[in-house]
Image: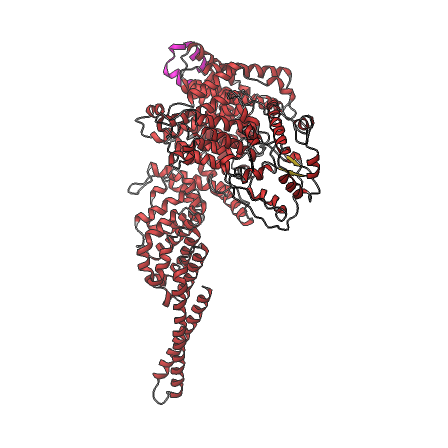
Amino acid sequence: MKLMTALVNVALNLSINQDNTQRQYEAERNKVAGKRANEKLELLLEKRKELQENQDEIENMMNSIFKGIFVHRYRDAIAEIRAICIEEIGVWMKLYSDAFLNDSYLKYVGWTLHDRQGEVRLKCLKALQTLYTNRELFPKLELFTNRFKDRIVSMTLDKEYDVAVEAIRLVTLILHGSEDALSNDDCENVYHLVYSAHRPVAVAAGEFLHRNEVRKINIFLLHEHAAYLVDSLWDSSQELLKDWDCMVELLLEDPVQGEEVLGDRHESALIELMVCTIRQAAEAHPPVGRGTGKRVLTAKEKKTQIDDKNRLTEHLIVALPMLLSKYQADSEKVANLLQVPLYFDLEVYSSGRMEKHLDALLKQIRVVVEKHAEMEVLEACSKTYSILCSEEYTIMNRVDIARSQLIDELMDRFAHSVEDLLQEGDEADDDDIYNVLSTLKKLTAFHNAHDLTKWDLFKNCYRLLKMGIEQGSMPEQIAVQALQCSHYSILWQLVKITEGCPSKDDLVALRRVVKSFLAVCQQCLSNVNTPVKEQAFMLLCDLLMIFSHQLVTGGREALQPLVFNPDSTLQNELLNFVLDHVFIDQDDENQSMEGDEEDEANKIEALHKRRNLLAAFCKLIIYDIVDMPAAADIFKQYMKLFNELIQDQGPNLDRTSSHVSGIKELARRFALTFGLDQIKTREAVATLHKDGIEFAFKVPNPKGPEYPPLNLAFLEVLCEFSSKLLRQDKKTVHSYLEKFMTEYMMERREDVWLPLIAYRNSLLTGGDDDRLSVTTGASSTSKASTVRSKRGRPPQHKRRPEEESVDGSWIMRNDTLQTPGALHTPQLTSTVLRENPRQAADHIPDQDSSEPGSEPDYMHNPQIQMSWLDQQKMEEVNRKERGGMNYMKSRSGGVRQQVRGLMEDDAEPIFEDVMMSSRGQLEDMNEEFEDTMVIDLPASRNRRERAELRPDFFDSTAIMEDDAGFGMQMF
């Protein structure tokens, strides 16, 4: 392709020279006869003819290369070759548009837009961008645009973000060149990409929106995610978005008769847009969800940020009180406007002598607090006071006085309203309830960000809660707010104690407060109102976490009196709450929301609430605050979901459904909790597989044995835990699985048997199913005979006994075995020691002798520890071993002499790992014997004979061998 590009450059130069020669010839021929030079005309004719011949020759070469190479390689099986072809044809079209920029060549680029590789699609778009950048080429691209426009627009949603970005840029170039090229629907598809989570895609869409000024739609200004719209347009429309003077003027101008004014929706949208632009300018980073984090600003960007912050501060310090005054009755507008002071340079108040504007702002905030009871507005006011009261600013004292005056007034009102409510009891009217609730909401919002402990809010809140528990008539909103306010009061008291040097009386007082509040929350768990129960549950979990044993860590032993450990009654109540309110029937929840216009949004919100409740309780389990058995009840709920799926669909479970995918994902995450230490979790993982296999085959299919068991689909979930098995344990698990399988099951390949197939494959991967051993049974076949040629390979290195391992003993356990709480995993390993053949022939061990690797060796080795089950297993292995030794001793002398001759060259004893994972390892160990011995055994006995040359005395699977096998006639 590079050769073709070089030829295109040559052809282009020839074409230019030919045009120049033609112009010179025409100019000379048009001269009058007296001034015309005939010799020059002849030279020009000859030169033109020569250039034309060269041009024809080059074009023939290019045509041959194009038809012989490009036409075949642009759809090559290798993506890199296809990408090179498209990249080079783009270069040809750009360099020599007269010859290549036509539909005969463009079609190849258009077809390749559908390539399955993103790299190739990206090259297509970049090649087209170079063409659409030149507006003079648009007439030649008109037919191509009409033919492939839909495909280009659809590529703006490409799964490869780089391709999507280039597609949007190409669409922008097409629109810039011809406004009629794209329809309104095409533009709408690109418009909505300004809200993409991927910032490059959103910025490219913002550039498209900025350039298409004629078709801008007000719906973008009314979108709820204005921060993302501003971020998308920030690079292309920054000057327009920073025009805060114009925005404020539009918001503050009085309506004039005959002029169009902004409506309520437009005012709300403009205020939100202005606040988002202020945040973007002051923070200089994208909103949450875009980007991987705050990037380091360059010196130029930092200077721009400081300048923008100073400019918006100087202007909006004056305008903000007026805006709050105008829109003080609108909660949505006020909540947005109160975010503006968060981005001020507050030093301007003192340095610019603008204290009067600060007083005006504080006055308007107080008016807003008086008029509104919405938590969003109150929290915005509280946060504004918190920022203005920062100790780093000189205005702190002025703001603190205003805040204290406001709190004093609210506290007096709250105390009187609480007394009235408590006195009237059940006879309290709506006004009394409203007075208590509105004041309590304001105090709770302020207590969240401000230390109000000196006003002792806990006392009145506790009185309200006790009255609600005793009389059962407290409105749920008052109970919820009282719980939250009491919680904040306790936390602020804890902060003061941890930051100072608390006395014993302070600790006792706080402990008394916490204990009484925990008791109230526990009683609220049985409240009839669900919001009260949920609030009490969340606060209980949070306080138990805060006042747990971790409170005294980090040198804070003095806080030991504040540590609370939940008793069994409280733990059971928390667990029952989770079971009753988190794991609820989805159908019941859907029916309770039926008829709601925002049904889907309510479902999502309810799901998030349930997840938060579950997360709060699970934290108590993780940090050992609640007993670990509580986790079992949580996992039972997920197992219940699987059982319901089995009952609904049986073995014909839809493996692609979201429910099955969710269970598999849960199993995958659960498998990750076992960590990387497979030795430590060996027993637990093995028991899990054992019980899982039993569960899968527990319930037979009522249709007959030729149908899969009802729980067979569980094996697909069990596959997620196969990677946590040790290599040698996979073979043992596979052997245990084969006990439950019939020959009919092994031959099945239908979809209903896929869980079994997948589980078997997960056990065979990296396992020992393919090694040559006497204990592998019928799982693999052997060759009829073996003829080897010796290769120069170094002898095998010795292996340390502690590096070798054996199958776990869990397979021989009783069916009633339970997973142990503390995992005492034996580090028992098993090897076969092949001693020097001459010594082996003369010193075959007796029954009372102890050889390396036998039970006494393991029992007295301080580095190896065995469980009781493994000791029982070793006794059984030794019995088999003694029988195998007697058998080897009685074998015919011919084979013994051959084996002795084979092993005479071994200078040192060789340790063999009987758990070798592949046939290749075994063959490598035998290759050093190839020229001294050829064993040609019958096909039916070849494998057993070769295995018996290396008896697996400690292989755990030998337990399952028939005793009669040792007496089999081999020759």
Q: Residue furthest bottom?
A: 34
The x and y percentages for residue 3 are 46, 66
Q: Is residue 795 magenta?
A: no
Label count reads 0
Q: Which residues are magenta?
A: 417-437
Q: Is residue 871 above or below residue 269?
A: above
Q: Quadrant of the N terminus?
A: bottom left
Is residue 436 on the magenta stretch? Answer: yes
Displayed quadrant of residue 878: top right
Could one spot residue 559 in this view of the protein?
yes
> Which of the image's four quarters has the C terminus?
top right
Q: Position of residue 656 (x, y in %)?
A: 39, 36
Please provide percent x and percent y for residue 609: 43, 26
How is the model colour-coded?
A: secondary structure
- The answer to which of 161 and 139 lies nearer the viewer is 161
Who is closer to the viewer here, 255 or 65?
65
Residue at (44, 57) in percent of width and height = 83
Q: Is residue 777 left or right of residue 713?
A: right
- Of residues 387 and 852, the one nearer the viewer is 852
Image-based side of 653 in relation to 927, left or right = left
| Image position, residue 227 (x, y; %) | 43, 40
Q: Nearer the viewer, residue 78 or 950?
A: 950
Q: Which quadrant of the figure has residue 773?
A: top right
In this rendering, does residue 521 appear at all? no
Q: Main secondary structure of the magenta part?
A: helix
